[in-house]
Image (spheres, rainbow, N blue to C red):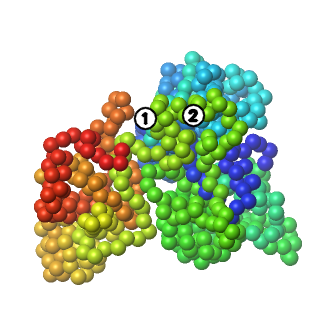
Amino acid sequence: MQKKHCTTYYQLKYSKKKNVVNQGGTRCFARDTLVKTDTGYKNIQDIKPSDNVLSYNEKKNKFEYKMVEELHTFEVNAKPLIEIKINGEVIICTYDHEIYTITEDGKQKGWIPAFMFAKRGMATSEWDKLKILCQQLGEDLDDQLQMHWASKNNANNLRWVMYNSDYANNEYIIFVAQKDLEARIVDNQTVYDLTVQDNHNYVITKSDLLVHNSGKTYSTLEFLIELLLKHPNKGYIVEIVRHTRTAAMSTVARDFEEILKNLGVFHRPNWRKLEGSYTFDTKDNRYNTPNIVYFSGMDGESARGRKRHILYVNEANQIDGADFLQLQLRTMHKIIIDFNPSFVTHGWIDELLEAKNENGDSETDHFITTYKDNPFLTAPIIKSIEDLKDTNPTAWVIFGTGQRASREDAVFTNYEVCDEVTFDSPIYGLDFGYNDPCSLIKVELFEKEKTIHAQQVLYKSKLSIDDLVMQIGRVLPNGGLIIADSSSPSFIEHLNDKLSYQGIRVIAASKTTSIVEQLALINQFKTRIVGQDLEREFKMYSFMLDKNDNPIDKIDSKRSVDHAIDAFRYASYYQLSSLARNNEGLTTLLDLIKKQKYNKIRINR
């Protein structure tokens, strides 16, 4: 491959250990970044899969609308964010998000990381600070600048490509943004990116600037493809796994095909999409065994049953520990996983990070470092990093300690994601929905351990009331208590009519205490959760922010999803209220919560 690769590629290339864990965010934008869709501009956080966004077909030199396949949300991003002011627009993105540029003479164009373009608009002190922060991620920006194709052209000659709709058919014409460039580093925040069908790019802001979509897996795929091309006919089996086969084929497999085509080595007959496999050529030698790559999901049996030499688990925090164990047992040589850091314990990922061989040595390369691990840092650089303790505590957690940071706007801070939890006498929380998912969560409070166990039982859309009766009857064959959404009394009455003969009783959730007050009480207990949708909602559930980005005592409905959480809250608060009636300490705490500001009594902040 005749090009400079990003750090992930080299980390994989030179790793000698069995397991490689790549922890980090992707290339993303702030939540209010405008994206051009076929119905007008939308904030990136409001884009939904199946929306059509304006995209650039590089082969045809043509702008066209393409479907969004996924919206990615990352609550913590270990990468520095930069703010770019250009053409009167303000853009906040990760420093390495790829943008499409063209030289002033129009002879060269291509994708470059945002920092290469933004450098000329940065003060020297800001540029030096960005280099220091990136060093902690293993990135040498000066080295990348020297090696990149753009270095052959003066940075001042690079222009950011923009779409111009004034020209007929919207084809073949690209204009460039170049006015009044300013850039600086900004604080970390929730960021977003898209996966766009076919073209893998989209247009942002009302200046219609062209940017690349999520590229987090690209370097890993380049490494794997180069390995198989350099060692042909060895019979290597590589398996690339996501939580579903559809996700694997619609995202990773598309990037895989694109890389092969760019290298000029893609052969259509070798690509068996129905099977989800690509076979590398055997050079017509019947005694050679070809290398094969499979794309699989944990919703099928093939990934669990097949042996392979190399396993790559993409977006590993969407896969549970039991599934990973099945994959691990059938992998003979190397395991590569990537995941995005969040604010909870990734149990099985942490176990993999701690794995040791018979000599007591680590079996895993984990590519997160701190300044203390680098003996070559000078005293001024060390001081700049340690100053973050006071100037930017979140950045200090990420860059100074190498740990996952906590969010000030996170509602749930005292919880753990588990593969399984135990129950003695559970009750159930039920949140109604039709177009939105109907959610049933199994919950039990353990007073002595100060823990709450919660397990997702049902999370499904398009259920009629009779469908719901059937589902609940199957889940609770021996009866039980359900605390349900009080806004639907007729549904509660219908469920009781149909299910009482099974010993199932459905009652309305309490309305006497606000949501925030209920959550304050729940947060005094450690919650252990099981279930992918429940986990996702716990991660996303956020307080609103004021104009200074400080959390206030209201739930942010735009960034939060609450179908499973509401069901969990109904049942948890019911049990906690029952306990409080017999527990003077909890009763006092509940009174305090009702009388005082929530943010004064939150724990784990």
* Residue pointed to by mark 2: 385
Q: Please, is residue 597 above or below residue 604 in the view?
A: above
Q: Is residue 412 above or below residue 386?
A: below
Residue shown at 36%/51% (left/top)? 413
Residue 448 visible in rendering: yes
Confirm or deny contact between disc 2 and disc 1 (CB under 8 A).
no
Mark 2 or 1 closer to N-term? 1
The secondary element bearing badge 2 is classed as helix
Within-10-Å neighbours for mark 2: few <14, some 14–19, many 20+? many
Image label count: 2
Image quarter of the C terminus? top left
Q: Which residue is mark 1?
A: 32
C-alpha separation, residue under disc 2 versus residue under disc 1: 29 Å
Question: How busy is the neighbourhood of tag 1: few (under 14 within 10 Å), some, or many (20 plus)?
Answer: some
Q: Residue at x 38, y 41 (%)?
A: 408
The residue lying toward the viewer, choosing from 370 and 348, is 370
Give the structural element (helix, strand or loop) at label 1: loop
Does residue 561 appear left or right of residue 293 in this picture?
Answer: left
Residue in the foreground of this view, choosing between 486 and 470: 486
Q: Amino acid at mark 2?
A: Ile
Looking at the image, residue 225 sits to the left or right of residue 318; the answer is: right
- Seen at 49% across and 26% down, the residue is 90
- The residue drawn where x is 67% and y is 71% is 358
- Residue 599: x and y, percent? 27, 41
Q: Residue furthest top?
A: 180
The image quarter in which residue 575 lies: bottom left
The amino acid type of the residue labelled 1 equals Asp
Which circle, 2 or 1, is nearer the viewer?
Answer: 2
Residue 258 can be seen, yes or no: no
Front residue of 322 and 282: 322
